[in-house]
């Protein structure tokens, strides 16, 4: 055993980071690509000499399954595995459950995926897309360019869709639109016949989908099989190329998405990331979309904040992470008051890929 890897937290040569990634359950479909994205970030940083001279030691913990089990794993990681920082690539329900433990343990926690916004917990930095910058301009564009006015909202039954829909309703009202139906579906539900019947009866112009992971895949398949895809637009907030593969190229008609990262954007940073990912994991590696690429972004933020602070102690590190601009595959990202502003794009599904329509 390498004894350099042990000792008091912060006093050893390696920086221990626990990646809490959904590897099981509905959002588990992003687990392989998110893990690979994080591993690529660790390899890139360690090749540059680590963070402040400390090589990163990265371990993955499953953030799927019952919340109580995830909390047990987090307590184990902090108490027994002696981690220095937690990187969260999981649902908002897990983040909300972990906040108390993070606050008590005084360990920095970087949360990377799309989420509902409003995170203010001391020690937590959320860098994912939020409704204000993701949904609002998309809703305005759909209202103006596609002349939609009747909206049906469907989401998984947990905090991200609950809070996101509250914001979405305000944005729809700004355009003069009308919400003709809304419902929340238990996570893991794969029979959508009843929901599709209600959607058909409501006659919306567009369905806003806040279902998570494989739940969104089964819903979108059923939506197309029911003949709705040709007549009703779809707009999804937590969606990427992995989901398109699950749906199938013939079932993605009139499906839109907004995100801070699409492989098809064609930026230098994004292309470099894609090339390094393929070089490390091969041509048949799990496809990387916005949900899994965010894992790489978390390490970009950490490296920039540590360089600015000159230390990995929690308080100065978190202070340095605020009002900070870092660069990653998404381009320049500004973090202020615990939230991130990044380039954002609206795209339309084109078979198994997304075609970017415009920056928003």
Image (cartoon, grey):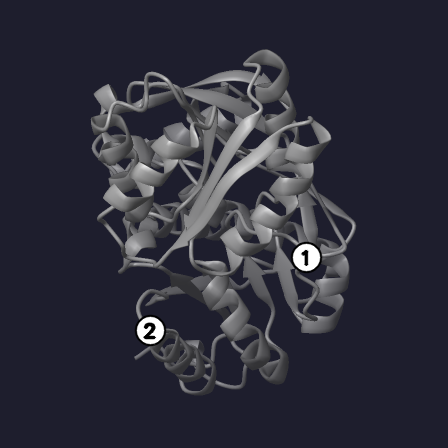
Q: Residues within 10 Å of mark 2 (few under 14, many from 20)?
A: few
Q: Residues within 10 Å of mark 1 (few under 14, many from 20)?
A: few
* 258 vs 150, nearest the viewer: 150
Q: Position of residue 76 (x, y in %)?
A: 39, 83
Figure quadrant of residue 321: bottom right
The percent position of residue 274, horizontal first and vertical second, equals 40, 30
Q: Quadrant of residue 132?
A: top right
Task: Residue at 59% x, 27% y: name it.
Answer: 138
Helix or strand or loop: what does disc 1 sit on? loop
Query: Circle 1 is placed at which residue position?
Result: 118
Q: Which mark is residue 176?
A: none
Looking at the image, tell me whether mark 1 or mark 2 is earlier in sequence order. Answer: 2
Q: Secondary structure at mark 2?
A: loop
- Reply above or below: 281 against 146: below
Quarter where residue 314 is shown: bottom right
Measured Cα–Cα span from mark 1 to mark 2:
24 Å
Residue where numbered disc 2 is placed: 66
Q: Is residue 321 visible?
A: yes
Residue 264, image x, y percentages:
44, 20
């Amino acid at each position: 055993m390498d004894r350099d890897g042990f000792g008091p937290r912060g006093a050893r040569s390696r920086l221990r980071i626990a990646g809490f990634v959904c590897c099981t359950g509905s959002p588990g479909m992003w687990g392989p690509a998110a893990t690979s994205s994080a591993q690529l970030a660790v390899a890139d940083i360690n090749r540059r000499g680590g963070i402040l001279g400390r090589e990163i030691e990265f371990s993955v913990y499953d953030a799927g399954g019952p919340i109580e089990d995830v909390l047990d794993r987090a307590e184990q990681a902090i108490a027994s595995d002696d981690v220095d920082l937690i990187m969260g690539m999981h649902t908002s329900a897990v983040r909300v459950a972990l906040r108390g433990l993070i606050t008590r343990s005084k360990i920095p926690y970087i949360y990377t995926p799309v989420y509902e916004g409003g995170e203010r917990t001391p020690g937590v930095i959320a860098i994912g897309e939020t409704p204000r910058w993701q949904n609002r301009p998309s809703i305005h564009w759909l209202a103006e360019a596609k002349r939609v006015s009747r909206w049906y909202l469907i989401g998984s039954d947990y905090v991200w869709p609950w809070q996101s829909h509250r914001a979405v309703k305000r944005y729809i009202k700004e355009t003069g639109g009308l919400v003709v139906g809304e419902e929340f579906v238990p996570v893991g539900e794969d029979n959508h016949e009843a929901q599709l019947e209600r959607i058909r009866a409501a006659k919306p112009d567009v369905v806003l989908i806040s279902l998570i992971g494989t739940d969104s895949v089964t819903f979108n398949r059923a939506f197309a099989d029911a003949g709705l895809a040709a007549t009703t637009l779809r707009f999804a907030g937590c969606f990427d190329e992995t989901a398109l593969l699950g749906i199938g190229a013939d079932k993605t008609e009139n499906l839109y998405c907004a995100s801070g990262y699409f492989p098809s954007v064609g930026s230098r940073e994004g292309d470099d990331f894609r090339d390094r990912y393929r070089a490390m994991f091969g041509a048949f590696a799990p496809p990387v979309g916005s949900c899994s690429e965010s894992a790489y972004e978390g390490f970009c933020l950490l490296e920039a904040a540590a360089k600015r602070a000159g230390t990995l102690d929690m308080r100065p590190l978190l202070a340095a992470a605020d009002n900070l601009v870092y660069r990653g595959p998404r381009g320049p990202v500004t973090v202020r008051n615990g939230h991130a502003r990044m380039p954002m794009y609206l795209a339309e599904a084109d078979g198994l890929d997304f075609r970017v329509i415009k920056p928003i």
